[in-house]
């Protein structure tokens, strides 16, 4: 049962009482109903739950796109008003793409556990994909306007009240939550309502063209059988590693192989650069902190240096209550603690000593027992999810407070680092201003005490031409990212990293990717030639074996005659896993073969010969399987219809993308 919105949520023709009547579109009646309202209402009524859920998902996702102007340094130098595309009479600007790009990049970075930079954003196609979505949105908006599709206040109210984002745990509209979400997205209610007025016709239009797109039962049945059919085969594997007798290549062989495989001997782009850097640790080492400051800090934070009572604890951990009681009885009889643990309970000697523990470091039920025990007295058996524990305290270290002398090294290090972090920010700003004012890298390094490091050549992975890691005074991936984003002869801005380091660099030399000379890669070329010969040998052996198979001489017999073994495969499906028992290349050929047919395939590991022995039809799908597949096909088909529709709209509303401006901005 869906909870109805509160009675006072909206007044008639008013989105909220505080805002007064909503402006109605010209040409609409008192209810805000236009000529297409009846049609759209019918669509909403008949649309399946999938479409409704998609609509709500669009509304939810859109929150991530609205009201956000990125503060990323990638974009600070770009004008947000620069036009990057035109769609009919609409213009898409840099800011429009920034607004949708930044949340997507942050989400992907969180999923991957690493920061995504500009180059990776382009390589992954994020920029182009989101720009395409903005174009599609504009196409749909303009088509909705052309058709005169408008929404009444009632539709807007219902959409807001029905949005799961605005509901409390009981499923009722939550005004406070609504206000909080809008505030977090820097939206007023008027702005949100205006966006809803734009978004709902767009969604209605998609619903109108996709509702009713469903696969026939025959299509579902055929696809189910196709996907779930299994095949088995007898297979002979001929691994490359087992090939022998290829010998050593001649000079002519090497030259021919080298000329045909330049891609194997390509050296990456290398860049030589000069780095100037300063770390907080560098500054902290020279900062002297007066004793009076340290003593004042110690007095203020004396509680931070309190050391709670600690107890050195042993345990006997029994798997059952019976074992624990047997151990307890043995201890009461004077048996040795370790002997009871190992012989009666069967405990490993390594697990007897828990060590010196504070109360907060132990589960409460065990801590309460351990910190109430007298020395060398066993506790009663205590049950936890791990088993039955008997504890013994062998040493008690009373609570204490570290003296000023003991706390001084830690206080000094903290003071010095905090002071260093403050100073390094100031130094970084001044150094950046100096570079902007025309100072050289060497002048900035000398003036502000930055270390200078010269690297002759490094690839994007931080390795020199010999494949060895380059040595840098700072450990930051931003150095290489900055290097490969800085043109030859140019000096980067001063970069302040999260760990309290500043650096700037100059790209001194760029060596483009090039093919290494044969003399420098002779050993690698020789190994590559030998590997190629081995692959050719096993491929020829596979062809010869396949040719020997006939109706009277099946693969198993033909293989045995050549002292090879044929193995029966498990039932194979069309979706072969790369690390599965049968190589995907061979599976693909088996699913194109007829029963009894012999096929061959190759991959990097070797060559394969297979004789298809059985094709198993899965039969008609169950009702549940058919329904699940039909739903999946419906969703995919509707997406295809929507894509075709927006592609067709480009004829009505011409699309022009300024790729140069896109590349310049992103």
Image: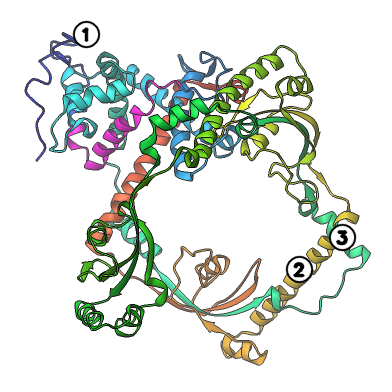
Residue 145 placement, left or right of 657: left
Q: Which residue is mark 3?
A: 522
Residue 238 pos. (x, y %): 65, 78
Q: CA distance from mark 3 to mark 2?
A: 14 Å
Q: Is residue 651 visible?
A: no
Asked whether disc 2 touches disc 1, contact meaning CB atoms under 8 Å apart, the reply is no
Quadrant housing the C terminus: top right
- Which quadrant is the N terminus positioned in? top left
Asked which secondary structure carries label 3, the reply is helix
Looking at the rendered structure, the secondary structure element under dot 2 is: helix
The Cα atoms of the two marked residues, 2 and 1, are separated by: 75 Å
Q: Nearer the viewer, mark 3 or mark 2?
A: 3
Q: Is residue 19 above or below residue 75?
A: above
Task: Tell whether 99 sits left or right of 286.
Answer: left
Comparing 228 with 286, the one in front is 286
Name which of mark 3 and mark 2 comes first in the sequence.
3
Q: Quadrant of residue 523?
A: bottom right
Q: Residue furthest left?
A: 7
Q: Specify the segment rendered in magenta.
A: 43-69
Q: Nearer the viewer, residue 30 or 394?
A: 394
Q: Are marks 1 and 3 in contact (CB under 8 Å)?
A: no
């Amino acid at each position: 049962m869906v909870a109805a919105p509160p009675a006072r949520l909206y007044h008639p023709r008013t989105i909220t009482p505080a805002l007064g009547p909503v402006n109605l579109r010209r040409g609409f009646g008192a209810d805000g109903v236009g000529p297409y309202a009846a049609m759209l209402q019918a669509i909403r009524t008949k649309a399946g739950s999938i479409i409704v859920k998609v609509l709500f998902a669009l509304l939810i996702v859109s929150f991530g796109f609205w009201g956000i102007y990125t503060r990323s340094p990638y974009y600070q130098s770009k004008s947000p008003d620069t036009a990057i595309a035109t769609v009919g009479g609409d213009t898409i600007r840099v800011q429009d793409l920034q607004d949708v790009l930044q949340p997507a990049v942050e989400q992907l970075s969180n999923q991957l556990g690493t920061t995504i930079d500009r180059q990776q954003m382009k390589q992954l196609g994020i920029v182009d994909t989101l720009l395409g979505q903005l174009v599609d949105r504009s196409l749909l908006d303009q088509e909705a306007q052309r058709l005169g599709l408008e929404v009444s206040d009632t539709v807007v109210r219902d959409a807001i009240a029905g949005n799961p984002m605005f509901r409390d745990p009981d499923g009722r509209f939550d005004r406070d939550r609504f206000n909080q979400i809008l505030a977090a997205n820097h939206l007023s209610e008027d702005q949100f309502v205006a966006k809803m007025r734009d978004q709902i016709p767009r969604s209605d239009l998609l619903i109108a063209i996709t509702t009713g797109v469903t696969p026939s039962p025959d299509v579902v049945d055929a696809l189910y059988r196709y996907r779930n059919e299994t095949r088995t085969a007898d297979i002979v594997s001929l691994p490359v590693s087992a090939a022998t007798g290829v010998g050593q290549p001649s000079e002519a062989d090497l030259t021919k192989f080298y000329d045909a495989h330049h891609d194997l001997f390509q050296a990456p782009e290398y860049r030589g650069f000069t780095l100037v850097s300063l770390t907080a640790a560098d500054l902290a080492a020279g900062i002297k902190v007066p004793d009076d400051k340290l003593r004042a800090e110690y007095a203020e934070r004396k509680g931070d240096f309190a050391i709670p009572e600690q107890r050195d604890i042993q345990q006997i951990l029994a798997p059952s209550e019976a074992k624990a009681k047997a151990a307890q009885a043995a201890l009461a009889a004077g048996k040795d603690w370790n002997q009871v643990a190992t012989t009666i309970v069967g405990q490993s000697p390594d697990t007897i000593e828990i060590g010196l523990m504070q109360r907060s470091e132990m589960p409460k039920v065990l801590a309460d027992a351990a910190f109430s025990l007298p020395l060398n007295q066993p506790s009663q058996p205590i049950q936890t999810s791990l088993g039955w524990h008997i504890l013994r305290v062998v040493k008690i270290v009373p609570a204490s407070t570290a003296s000023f002398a003991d706390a001084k090294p830690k206080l000094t290090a903290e003071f010095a680092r905090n002071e260093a972090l403050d100073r390094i920010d100031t130094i970084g700003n001044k150094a950046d201003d100096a570079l902007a004012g025309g100072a050289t890298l060497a002048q900035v390094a000398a003036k502000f005490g930055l270390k200078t490091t010269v690297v002759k050549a490094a690839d994007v992975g931080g390795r020199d031409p010999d494949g060895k890691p380059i040595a840098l005074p700072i450990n930051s991936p931003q150095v290489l990212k900055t290097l490969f984003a800085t043109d030859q002869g140019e000096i980067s801005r001063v970069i302040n990293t999260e760990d309290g380091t500043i650096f700037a660099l100059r790209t001194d030399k760029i060596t483009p990717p090039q093919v290494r000379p044969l003399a420098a890669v002779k050993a690698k070329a020789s190994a590559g030639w030998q590997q190629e010969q081995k692959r050719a040998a096993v491929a020829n052996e596979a062809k010869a074996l396949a040719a020997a198979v006939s109706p009277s001489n099946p693969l198993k017999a033909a293989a045995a005659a050549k002292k090879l073994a044929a193995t029966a495969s498990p039932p194979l499906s069309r979706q072969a896993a790369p690390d599965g028992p049968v190589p995907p290349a061979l599976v693909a050929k088996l699913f194109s073969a007829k029963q009894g047919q012999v096929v061959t395939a190759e991959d990097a590991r070797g060559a394969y010969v297979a004789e298809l022995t059985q094709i198993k039809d899965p039969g008609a799908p169950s009702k549940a399987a058919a329904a699940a597949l039909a739903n999946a096909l419906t969703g995919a088909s509707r997406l295809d219809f929507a894509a075709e529709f927006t592609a067709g709209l480009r004829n009505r509303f011409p699309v022009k993308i300024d790729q140069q401006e896109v590349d310049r901005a992103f």
